[in-house]
């Protein structure tokens, strides 16, 4: 295995000041593996984050994604109260074309070489079956199948966490946790989105969906014929009488164009890194739209993974996921009390926990 080089230095790639503890670039010519692991922080414990497997327009774009996603994992884990740091991995390539057992095993050996500083799990393009393969050569693997002692697919827990976040935000905004009669637009009905749709129907909400993949939409409409389907995200953001807009696909879903068109009173979804830049949240607020920070509500999957690491029963892990309601409400109430945006409130709360942990560790070494 050898490292691959980038055209631009790492400091030029991240959208925030470069603050990661470790970034490793690796390729294996035998299996065709080309991967990146970004460890943002181990202040609270070993870095945990999923492995994203997808094609990118450039290696630099893949690294940028890993950097931003790993930073988000640090904040997500801190705010969820987990004793875990933040990391993320990216395997470059179309999984439908290049994913093989030998590639996953090579990747597993790559993760194992870090000695537990980073623990991997499912993400976009990777599944429980993939984690089972990786776990054959790497003990620092979660989201394994229950047959192998794992907690299984984290998507279910992620969807529950997003639902709990919506209910908390509804209480904050409208004075009641019920989503009965609310209209929710779900952009992206893949791993998490289609599960969220089911929860929303169970809550009595009206659901509008869109996805670039016809098969994903068909899976939802086959199960829920009453769902409304629109052509694209532009049509969804402009949908009349939308109460909640839920981005559940990839990042960068919220930009100036979306802000100017959105009809919803609230944004709360599963996608990571939804804001194209932090200023978008202020633009949403200026239009009266409440933004619920993505890493606050989409932490259900990593909460489940933490439960797997601790050996918790499925029921105890599920209770931990449900507590994301309290976390979301605390963030929104803190923002209101301080007169700041929810994103800033969430960042402050996460940073305080990471900083306190660093201070304790520093005193312990002195």
Image: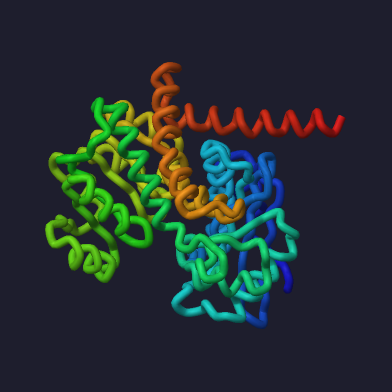
Residue 331 screen position, x and y as percent = 44, 29
Q: Position of residue 285 (x, y in %)?
A: 33, 28
Up-down: is 237 above or below 282?
below
13 sits to left or right of 267? right
Residue 64 seen by the camera:
no
* Res 281 → quadrant: top left
Q: Quadrant of the N terminus?
A: bottom right
Q: Is residue 101 above or below residue 88?
A: below
Tell which of 261 and 79 is nearer to you: 79
**Above or below, comparing residue 56 to residue 168 in the picture:** below
Residue 26, percent from left and from top: 68, 67
Q: Residue at 63% across / 57% down in the picture?
A: 119
Task: Residue 232: name its quadrant.
Answer: bottom left
The residue most toward the right is 366
**Which residue is located at x 73 percent, y 60 percent?**
114
Which residue appears at 26% of the width and 52% of the height?
233
Relative side of 196 to 119, left or right: left
* Image x and y of residue 104, in percent: 59, 74
Number of marks: 0
Asked whether 135 or 227 is in front, the reply is 135
Residue in the image at 18% along x and 43% along y: 183
Instruction: Say whether residue 361 is left or right of residue 224.
Output: right
Q: Does residue 216 appear in the picture of this structure?
A: yes
Is 26 or 301 nearer to us in this picture? 301
In what quadrant of the picture does the C terminus appear? top right
């Amino acid at each position: 295995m050898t490292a691959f080089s980038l055209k631009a230095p790492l400091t030029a790639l991240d959208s925030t000041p470069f603050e990661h503890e470790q970034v490793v670039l690796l390729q294996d010519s035998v299996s065709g593996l080309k991967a990146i692991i970004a460890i943002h922080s181990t202040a609270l414990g070993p870095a945990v984050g999923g492995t994203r497997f997808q094609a990118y327009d450039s290696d630099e774009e893949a690294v940028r994604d890993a950097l931003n996603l790993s930073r988000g994992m640090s904040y997500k884990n801190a705010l969820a109260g987990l004793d875990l740091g933040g990391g993320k991995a990216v395997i470059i390539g179309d999984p439908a074309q290049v994913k093989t057992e030998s590639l996953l095993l090579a990747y597993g050996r790559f993760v194992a070489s870090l000695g537990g500083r980073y623990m991997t799990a499912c993400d976009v393009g990777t599944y429980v079956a993939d984690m089972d393969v990786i776990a054959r050569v790497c003990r620092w693997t979660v989201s394994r199948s229950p047959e192998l002692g794992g907690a299984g697919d984290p998507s279910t827990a992620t969807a529950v966490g997003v639902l709990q976040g919506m209910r908390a935000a509804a209480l904050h905004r409208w004075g009641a946790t019920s989503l009965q009669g609310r209209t929710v637009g779900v952009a992206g009905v893949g791993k998490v989105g289609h599960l969220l749709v089911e929860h929303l129907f169970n809550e009595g909400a009206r659901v509008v969906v869109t996805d670039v993949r016809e098969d994903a939409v068909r899976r939802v409409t086959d199960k829920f014929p009453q769902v409304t389907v629109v052509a694209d995200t532009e049509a969804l953001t402009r949908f009349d009488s939308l109460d909640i807009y839920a981005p559940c696909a990839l990042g960068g879903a919220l930009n100036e164009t979306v802000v100017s068109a959105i009809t919803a009173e609230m944004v709360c979804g599963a996608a990571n890194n939804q804001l194209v830049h932090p200023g978008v949240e202020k633009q949403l607020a200026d239009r009266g739209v409440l933004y619920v920070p993505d890493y606050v509500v989409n932490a259900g999957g990593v909460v489940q993974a933490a439960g797997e690491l601790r050996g918790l029963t499925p029921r105890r892990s599920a209770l931990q996921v449900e507590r994301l309601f309290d976390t979301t409400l605390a963030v929104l109430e803190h923002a209101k009390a301080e007169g700041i945006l929810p994103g800033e409130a969430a960042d402050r709360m996460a940073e305080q926990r990471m900083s306190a942990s660093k201070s304790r560790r520093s005193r312990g070494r002195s």
